Image (cartoon, rainbow, N blue to C red):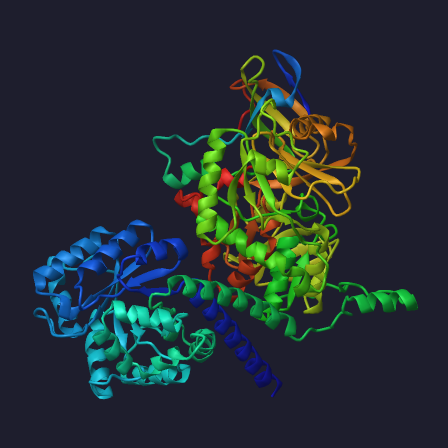
Amino acid sequence: MILLPCPWCGPRAADEYAYLGELTPRPDPQRATRTEWRDYLYLRANLAGWTTERWYHRMGCRRYLTVQRHTVSNDVRSVAAAGSGGEP
Amino acid sequence: MTETLSSARELSRALEAMQRQLLEAALRRPRYEVLPLDGTADAVVDHVPREVTVTVTASPRRGMEPTLALSESLARQGYRVVPHLAARLVIDESHLRDMLCRISEAGIRDIFVIAGDGEPAGVFPDSLRLLSALREGQGDGLGQHLEQVGVAGYPEGHPDVSDAQLTRALLAKQPSSTYLVTQLCFSARTVSAWVDRMRAAGVSLPVYPGVAGVVDQRKLLRVAQRIGVGQSVRFLRKHHGLLRLLSPGGYRPDGLVRELASRLAPSADDMAGLHVYTLGAVAATERWRREALEQTLEAVDRHRSRRRRVAPPSRYSALALVRHGVTGQAWPRAWDRHEPRDGYDVVIVGGGVHGLATAYYLATNHGIDNVAVLEKSYIGSGGSGRNTAILRSNYLTAEGVQFYDRSLQLYRRLAEELNFNVMFSRRGHLTLAHSDASLRTMRWRAEVNKLSGVDSEVIDADEVQRLVPYLDTSTAARYPILGALYHPPGGIIRHDAVVWGYARAASAFGVHVHQDTEVTGIDVNDGRVRGVQTTRGPIAAPIVVNATAGWSSLISAMAGVRMPVQTFPLQAAVTEPVRPFLHTVVVSGTLHVYMSQTARGEIVFGASVDPFASYSTRGSLDFLEGLASHVLELMPSLATLRVLRQWAGLCDMTPDFAPIMGRTHVEGFLVDVGWGTYGFKAGPVSGEAMAECIATGRTPELISAFGLHRFAEGELVGEKGAAAVGH
């Protein structure tokens, strides 16, 4: 298991968080075609390497975070509040 | 010359494969003809699974009503029903319209039209007249819901009508009907000669040969009495062959059905299915069908093992063991090492149980042996060697049950088939219920299982205690055990041996297994696969199969195919060996652990996937602590047992907890991936289905629900309930 440094609560065990998956830009629901929407819902790059993903600190500050993590070594490069930039 | 020979051999191989498929399909989904008598509904519901179509005859003495009532009742029970419409029992067009309305409302889409015996009760003296009325009434929606209309054929002729007349009548009925069922027959030669005559005369309808089920003398006489002696005498006169039934010991159609399949195999339409006249003996006929199906599947395996091997490996046997022991002679390599060829007919990426089984069944079932299996490490180094080797088929949906049941059947006979001891141990599988809600779901699962002929039952806590005395079944437990779903056919197997056995057998049939050969790229040109790039050079291939776990997204991405897959580690652990005390597989969904004792005496534990996606296969202390606390809730007496080691495997999770199998938008690129935490137990059946998919170019029905396109079309599979927990 890994420690994830929360910007508010400090380093915490990963199971305090909810892992919400890799960040993919959401298409505009009003204009997206069905294919675009289903691609957004289901398809994942699932990279073995650095990924940008969303985590939720459910047992802590209950904030949403943008995390850059290496999916092979589980090293964490950066953790920031969601929406503070760095998202694709 | 050689070319002609090899193509003749291929032809005969293809023919044999078709015969076996035909026989298996015919026995898997036959039609049972039943009589509309009191008790028939119960007999059908008690004995006949839903994949059998039930056709209900019409009795001239009792009119159409019993036929309709029984058809409606069976349709409500979930059967595909085909009511017989006897033309002479229909009074007029409005009577016909009423009946078709009822049939439609019952959800029935298939009728069988016959003339019927006796004097016409109304305006339809024969089936042709009724079919014409149906055709003319089509404009006002008469019978518009009908998808299939069957008519009768008479291979042995008809006592009152000449053969020429019969053929003319059939040609006249052809435009308003969609299939033919033959009258009872006892000679495959007669049927196949008749089919040839009909085809020559221009009758192209698919044919369902009609055979008698298992009928004993007393039963036949009792039925004859019940449907009226007059009719049964006429019946016997019409079918003189029926007298054979009266020989002592009754009659079994085994030989006839096999011969029908072998004579009619070249064209699928000549034997579209099997029509079985149960003559009131529904239970006996169903018992016969199960046995015959089982025998067919076994015959398939015997047939396979008879097939010529390229380089017969020395047979493993007790004798060989003694010989090698006494002489000290070294064992030969189990599978050969080769230099990669420039090209293969099929390249399979991933040397696990799925990839190797696919190669094996390609070579044995379909005669395609120019096949390479590429493995970046050693075979079985991925999920195939990291799972907890539990086998079961007690799933929640009928599709899931049938799929895994086939896998279990293949596993059961695998040691014999591969001549490799895979240590399959059928020891029963217990899924514990800790709440009323899970008990309810288990009852549901048990019923779904039973319908598909899979042994599962819900048992209470006392019974659980008897099976596994070390479980804490007291009510003081934090999560008291209320009962369990008991699945006797479940068990464990040695997973490495399965991989080795498949590799050895596939290699003996000419398949190349390349270890330490990593695929670094896939060549795609004009939407077609051309080959792969590997660490040992390029390999050309018109068909590339992605049979990897963990890396399936990355391999697919090389071909430009995006996947709805996320990779999660799944950890497991094993304890020091102790004396055998745990004789079943125990699973708790609530506590999310599963455990079994290996032949060596170690206890193997598994749990849920890690809470975040990763390609890391490092174990964690968190996992071990959580696992230990859950195991001790179930079996406090294990507290002093020491864990020897723990490990992780990579699981490709899909959004609906079902695999992704079959073709992709890149022609020639197939996938068998997304196997989550349940891939090992599906290895043989997946290999068999993928091999069929590759060889025939068609997606077998068994895996049709698992296509990649389901995500684009929003048709996800609903197996999460039984697949996610209790691996």
Residue in front for this viewpoint, B230 or A54: B230
Occupied quadrant, residue B339: bottom right
Q: Viewer-proximal residue, B657 or B478? A: B478
Residue that sits furthest to the right in the current view? B327
Camera sees residue B564: no
User: From the viewer's perspective, is residue B434 above or below residue B89?
Assistant: above
Quadrant of the frame with the N terminus of chain B: bottom right
Vertical order, B245 against B30 (above or below): below
Q: Is residue B105 visible?
A: yes
Q: How many numbered marks does the figure carry? A: 0
The residue lying toward the viewer, choosing from B368 and B63, is B63
For the point 67% across and 24% down, which residue is it?
A: A77
Is B267 placed above or below B337 here?
Answer: below
Q: Is residue B512 left or right of residue B92?
A: right
Residue B365, quarter of picture: bottom right
Residue under the point 47% across and 56% down: B702
- Judge by depth and name the residue closer to the eye, B104 or B546: B104
Q: Position of residue B357 (x, y in %)?
A: 63, 59
Q: Which percent across, then down, holds residue B253?
A: 43, 74
x, y percent for residue B290: 48, 63
Looking at the rendered image, the quarter that the C terminus of chain B falls into is top right
- Residue at 57% across, 80% down: B9
Asked where in the image residue B462 lies, by quadrant, the reply is top right
Q: Is residue B124 above or below residue B709?
A: below
Q: Position of residue B21 (x, y in %)?
A: 48, 68
Left or right: residue B321 versus residue B619 is right
